[in-house]
């Protein structure tokens, strides 16, 4: 691999290692495929990155799962070939939907369940303690609801306007009030 491509490959590997989505080798594989014209076979990727073919193969599964790489069949070849995704809008939509929105919703569900348990069995708690718990849960739910709304707007290709966020906060607040009933 030449110096120019190596700089990008190493930089993307370092970025991927801290992303929480990919590991360093996956970032390097993606970068190599991204800067290469046409698809590459596993052995070509392994040679370019000075990695074993089996290690590249294992890491390729994660890239395929995140839709960052796609499998390509070349006529006349029995080998699998791969190419990088180039539609970053779609890639980010996929990552945000599949990873981050799910996590956000889990936090909101946990806050709702905790608040419901507090309203049903929290009579033994002091009024001040209950108020603090309710305020913190509402604050958490509002924040995560706003972030969820922003991600939802992004994945639909919409602007993330203050009104979108305010609307989401009203929905989250309403759902919190309904769960208390």
Image: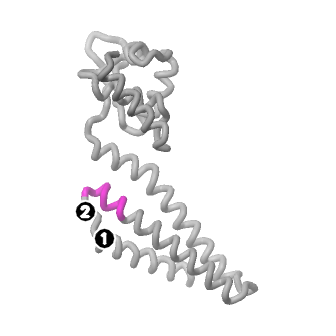
Q: Which residue is drawn at 54% across and 78% down?
A: 179
Q: What element carries label 2?
A: loop
Give the image quarter of residue 181: bottom right
- The secondary structure that dominates the magenta segment is helix
- Tell me where residue 36 appears, x and y as whole percent: 28, 22
User: Which colour style is shown?
Assistant: one colour
Tell me: residue 175, above or below residue 95. Answer: below
Image quadrant containing the N terminus: top left
Residue labelled with disc 2:
159
Q: Give the range drawn in magenta.
A: 150-157
Above-or-below relation of 71 to 51? below
Q: Earlier in the sequence, mark 1 or mark 2?
A: 2
- What is the tally of numbered marks visible in this picture? 2
Q: Mark 1 points at which residue?
A: 164
Q: Is residue 103 left or right of residue 5?
A: right
Which residue in the rendered view is the most extreme toward the top?
76
At a point 41% along the width and 39% down the height, the residue shown is 66
């Amino acid at each position: 691999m030449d110096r120019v491509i190596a700089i990008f490959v190493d930089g993307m590997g370092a970025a991927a290692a801290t992303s929480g989505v990919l590991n360093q080798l996956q970032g390097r594989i993606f970068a190599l495929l991204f800067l290469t014209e046409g698809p590459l076979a596993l052995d070509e990727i392994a040679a370019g990155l000075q990695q074993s073919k089996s290690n590249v193969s294992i890491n390729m599964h994660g890239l395929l799962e995140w839709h960052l790489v796609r499998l390509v069949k070349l006529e006349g070849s029995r080998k699998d070939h791969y190419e990088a995704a180039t539609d970053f809008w779609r890639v980010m939509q996929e990552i945000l939907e599949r990873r981050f929105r799910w996590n956000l919703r889990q936090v909101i569900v946990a806050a709702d369940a905790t608040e419901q348990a507090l309203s049903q069995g929290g009579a033994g708690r002091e009024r001040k303690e209950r108020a603090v718990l309710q305020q913190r849960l509402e604050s958490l739910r509002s924040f995560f609801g706003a972030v969820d709304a922003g991600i939802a707007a992004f994945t639909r290709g919409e602007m993330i306007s203050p009104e979108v966020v305010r609307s989401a906060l009203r929905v989250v607040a309403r759902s919190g009030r309904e769960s208390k009933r």
